[in-house]
Image: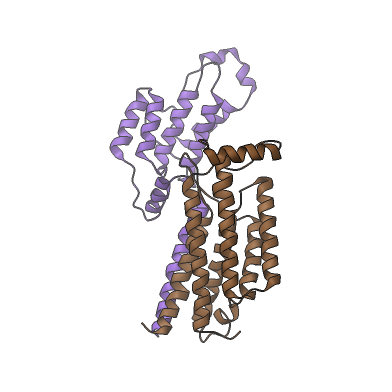
Chain colours: A purple, B brown
Amino acid sequence: MGGAVVRGVGLLLTLAYAGFIGWLYVERPQSFSEIGGGLASSVGLYTIDIPKFEEARRLFHNERLPEARAAFERADPARRDAVTQFYIAYTFYRQGWGRFYNDDALFEQAMQALDRATALSPGRPIRVNDRSLGLPDSDSLRAELRHGLDIEPEDFNPFRAFRRRK
Amino acid sequence: MSTEVRRALQESLVLPALFLSVAAAGGFRITTRGDVHFLTPSLFSLILAALLLGALVQSRLLRPNGLVTGRATFLESLTGAWLCATLFLASAQILNGLVPEHGLLALLFNLFLAVLLTNTIAAAPDKGRMLRSLAVTFGWALLMKYVLLAALVAPDEGLTGRLLRALVQGATLGGLPVDAWSPAVGYAMFAAAGLYLLGLWLVGRAETQQPGPS
């Protein structure tokens, strides 16, 4: 009887361990903090660093975009918070936006950050209650980034120089 | 602790956990910048793992009949099958970790391991010789990939790297397509290879102590 209990418990424990390893290979976290954050997130224990997040938003509103991005990264080191990742995408968008042409490399990075953000919020767009954002949800930001990355007839319109950054 | 409980503990917890750890470590890579990667086994690694399991069965180091069929209860058969599955995963991942990730060198390493394993099957060694053969194979593969090839692509090349580069430049038309991993990967793979061999030794020892039907 003792042997059967040990076998049952051992089987369950190793199946759980195999599940964890399978999660690592499916999710492919890219740093040890992402592994820790992913695990904490899966049991509902992960939270971002709120003071660092607020500091990052202050820098963002003051147009100090690279510093804001670094602060957002520090607030969400495991990259598990959709809103923080959305803001990171937004910092790339604002930094890459240009009146005559956009920086495609920064827009690509914005798209990657936005993909991370939307992957964390499956099935519904991310909405951020921030009046300073001209594009307050993930769908409109994605559309704006696509317009920026694609070459369209509108790109050759001289009045384009009068458009405003969102 | 009774023999039955000890065997149950080993078959259902210790050995599967050990082999799963080896499977996890086999695909683990970390770059010199600290980026972590988890690589799944290639198709060639899975084929090599099947060959390796064939060699283990032939040397009677692993006896699926004693582990899976012919057991007293369904749970014993289930844990035996689970142990075999984890051993297969560990074999695939340890072989995946011992060969370069891509390019001509990966093909050459894989072919070399395939020849070695089929030769081992043909030679039909006993348990002890099988373990020694595997230890030597793993040792050389570790030395080749994580010492010699790693020295060739290391950013701060030492004397070994300079000597090897001088030799290789004469033999190849260009650089070698080898990824530059952190030295920690070599240590992790060394530990994984050691754990894998320890696990195989434990499997063989358990079979000797309580042989099942062959």
What is the quadrant of residue A101 in the picture? top right
**Vertical placement of residue B70 versus B100, above or below:** below
Residue A29 in sight here? no
Q: Quadrant of the N terminus of chain B?
A: bottom left
Q: Residue drawn at (58%, 86%), measured in percent from left and top?
A: B213
Q: Residue drawn at (45%, 75%), measured in percent from left and top?
A: B10
Residue B208 in sight here? yes
Q: Nearer the viewer, residue A150 or B115?
A: B115
What is the quadrant of residue A65 in the picture? top left
**Vertical placement of residue B103 versus B44, above or below:** above
Q: Nearer the viewer, residue B194 or A37?
A: B194
**Vertical placement of residue B44 versus B72, above or below:** above
| Picture coordinates of residue A160, whole percent (x, y) | 56, 16
Count of all numbered marks drawn on residues in the image: 0
| Picture coordinates of residue B79, whole percent (x, y) | 50, 76
| Picture coordinates of residue A134, whole percent (x, y) | 44, 27
Q: Nearer the viewer, residue A62 or B139?
A: B139
Q: Residue drawn at (42%, 68%), measured in percent from left and top?
A: A13
| Picture coordinates of residue B82, whole percent (x, y) | 53, 72
Outermost residue on the left side: it is A51
**Vertical placement of residue A51 versus B83, above or below:** above
Q: Quadrant of the C terminus of chain B?
A: bottom right
